[in-house]
Image: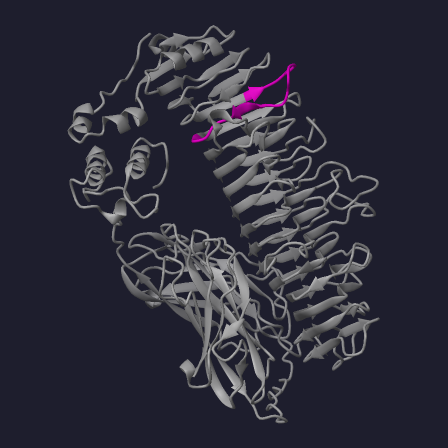
Amino acid sequence: MRVKRTTRLIIAVLLTFGMVPLVGALEPSTATITVAASDSTSTAKAEADYVCDGSNDQAEIQNAINALPAGGGTVQLTEGTFNCAGSILPRAHTTLSGQGDDATFIRFTNDGILRVDAEYVTLENFHVEGTGYSASRDFGVVYIRAGHNAVRDVTGTADRTIQALFYVRSVGLGNKNIEDIEFTRVVADSPGTYGFIHSSWGTNYKVHKNIRYTDCKAIDCGRYSAYNPWVTGFDFAELNDIEGLRVTRCIAEGTLESGFHFEYGPTKKDIVFTDCISRNNGQKPFPATYSLGGEDYFGAGYYAPRGPYTFNNCTAEGNSAYGFFFSYPDGVYLDNCTDLETGRGKTDYSAVKPTSFFIVQSLVTNANPSIVMEDCASIDSHGRGLYATLVDYVQIKNFTMTNPGGINGVGALIGDPALGVGFVSSNVDIHASGNSASKLVTVNSASNSKFTGSIVSDVATPFTVAGGGTNNVVVEGIKTVSNTLPVGSTGITTSGVNSGAVSIVNCAVVRPGSTPLPTPTTPTPVPTTPAPSGKPDLVVTDISWEPANPVTGAPVTLKATIKNQGDAATPAGTKHGVLFTFDDGAAGSGVWSDTYTRSIAPGAWVTLTANGGSAGAAWKAALGTHTVKVTVDDVNRIAESDETNNVRTKQITVSKPGSTPTPTPVPTTPTPSGKPDLVVTDISWEPTNPAPGSAVTLKATVKNQGDAATPAGTKHGVLFTFDDGAAGPGVWSDTYTRSIAPGAWVTLTANGGSAGAAWKAVEGTHTVKATVDDVNRIAEASETNNILTKSITVAKSTPQPEKGDLNADGKVDWADVALIGDMVLGRVETDPDADFNADGKVDWSDVSLLVDYFFGRVDTL
């Protein structure tokens, strides 16, 4: 055997600082042993330590692994195919590495697998395949049963004779839970089984914690042949509990059942999806009969029952049954999530009812809110855009539903008599359009709930409130743009509701072009992600009160919505206090909320109601206009990453009893011009904070505020200039040719320029000018409002010191390990920056983390 590289350990340095016991346990070897495939080049074979003959190649690979020193090392596989008729078992602190997933191929037969029962193992840069399994099939081709392991840049496939391609399973090894598993750029390509699955068996140590999937794909899992009828792309919780799951930029496509899937029973905590795509899943035929929640059909892009989940900027497209499915939601948050064409490819909806966003059964959970949807959209659903029943404390903000096909003629069904009505203490802001569903939005037997938004439809009953159980429902400010309904009518239909159960406020039907549609919120550019603080950060996002228009002397109940915008959960069992004051005490005694003690996950929020005060839990309204100040964590019970952002204020006006509020003047409707009118409503750029010399991509949001559509087939040009040309050549967008309807808008990205499509950033502060229809291709009602300007600042970035660089020499090395060792031994003053696990002290666990980081076992501190 020829070992190509060895590295002498710096034992003398460690002895100097008394750290040999620690480093002896953690020190990996950098030894590398090379194994050549039978079909690799003659040069590769000549340089290899082991050469395979194309039969039972697992023997040479295992011998190489066993020949590594006690500290581990790397087994490097050459290009070529390794035919393995048995299993490979990596040791602790070893790496099995190939030349790339298109160059190195490991093919298992005869029940062979890659079984990882040791910690700190890395698998990388190869293609793996498993076929023809005949023994117990309840395992995976890559079968991980221990923690602190990573799989990177691996593509694999398998036939239907094994349960999974990539399988993480708790079996109680070492009597501990599985922690710290990483999958990065891993692809399950057309296996006849589960692409990725987590489970447990025969152990109480069944928690999978701190699991990371980044840029992974599950493609056509079970689509052409299947291990069982329930094959999914990613199954994160089959029989195991899961905590601290991060799924980022992952794709599930063409799977037999759900793309991303959790089972109902396991406990889930701190689950976050970001920028994921799930499309064309649910390839299994619809069943003839279907029971909601049964095991005969899932068919979802994201199937997420019972638990708290966060979805940021995720997309579902063309999934057979559901885009996003939530049963028993217990603190779910969706931001900027979109579903397109749910039900695509299916025709018979008599059993399974395709739905973009499906929400049921929060009445038995404890979270308030149970689910929050912000800036989400359903587009061209073949069934329903939204379904919600047996739920409470639902908050839906700026939800867009475009052209749902409808089920039984209903596009959005809120409260379903067939399953059990119930939509309680909730708020829905919905912007719906389309004529395919005869009842665009139907609300059944809701109570203590409010509905706002807008409608664009010519159907006879675009918004219906029905059911004898309806109570205290407010429908407010909904403008219905219709060519058929009588102008001036409310556009809201009630059916079978008791007198006084529904309040319809400021709702009216208008003709197209007569009143501008509500302007949806332009998405905020994604900011640069700051370094995690490891702490929660509580802010107040809204203040409300009841009654909404108090009179002098009335008792007023205060509420505040608080959000945890930090990157750690708040501590359970600690009071999350909120203090309400009025003109800083000049307008009466303050009140507070101090009974909420449940943990708030990162990104989640709750609405808290005042329950106490020096003069009672309600404020006695004082005549006049006052400032309500709300302070969350007012007595600093919770350590936060930012203690300066806990306050929010809002004005409240109290009138005399019997007085009538001044009505809002109704604007005069201008005479229609019959022309479009393009304006720029926002300018953005990427990167958000550019450095000098960087390439900056410009975007402009363009709105048609006229009363006629822009012409299709005509370029909608936008020109971007920088200090009117003094800060570099301009760029433009000139490829958009679709019509823009009145009230609609699009965001256009620069695609060309005299020096390229990106602006080369120049240091300093500059004025970006965006001019829409810059060469006057489109006749507009006004040609004088096409320009918007915005300042951009380009600054030299100040290099941030790398975490772990304790001596500030620009790198993390043994000098830093020695320094933190001295801190632990009391030889030098302790640096708070060395508390890497944020437990309030610097000890040997922090030394261990730094050593792991230095050797590349962990990516971040």
Which residue is painted at 24% across and 21% down in the image? Answer: 7
* Count of marks, rendered view: 0
From this view, report whether residue 708 is shown above or below residue 755: below
Residues 743 and 596: in front is 596
Q: Position of residue 389 (x, y in %)?
A: 72, 58
Q: Quadrant of the C terminus?
A: top left
Residue 571 vs residue 381: left or right?
Answer: left
Provide the major secondary structure of the magenta segment: loop
Which residue is painted at 36% across and 60% down in the image? Answer: 642
Q: Position of residue 40 (x, y in %)?
A: 43, 12
Determine if residue 774 is in view: no
Residues 324 and 845: in front is 845
From this view, report whether residue 566 is shown above or below residue 633: above
Q: Position of residue 667 (x, y in %)?
A: 60, 86
From this view, report whether residue 545 is shown above or below residue 132: below
Q: Per the image, is 399 magenta?
A: no
Which residue is painted at 47% across and 68% down in the image? Answer: 578
Q: Position of residue 374 (x, y in %)?
A: 57, 60
Where is residue 660, by image quadrant? bottom right
Where is residue 149, by image quadrant? top left
Determine if residue 311 is in view: yes
Q: Quadrant of the N terminus?
A: top left
From this view, report whether residue 234 is shown above or below residue 840: above
Residue 589 vs residue 495: left or right?
Answer: left
Residues 438 and 269: in front is 269
Which residue is painted at 54% across and 62% down in the image? Answer: 606
Name the image colouring. one colour
Residue 211 vs residue 253: left or right?
Answer: left
Give the residues in magenta.
Answer: 129-149
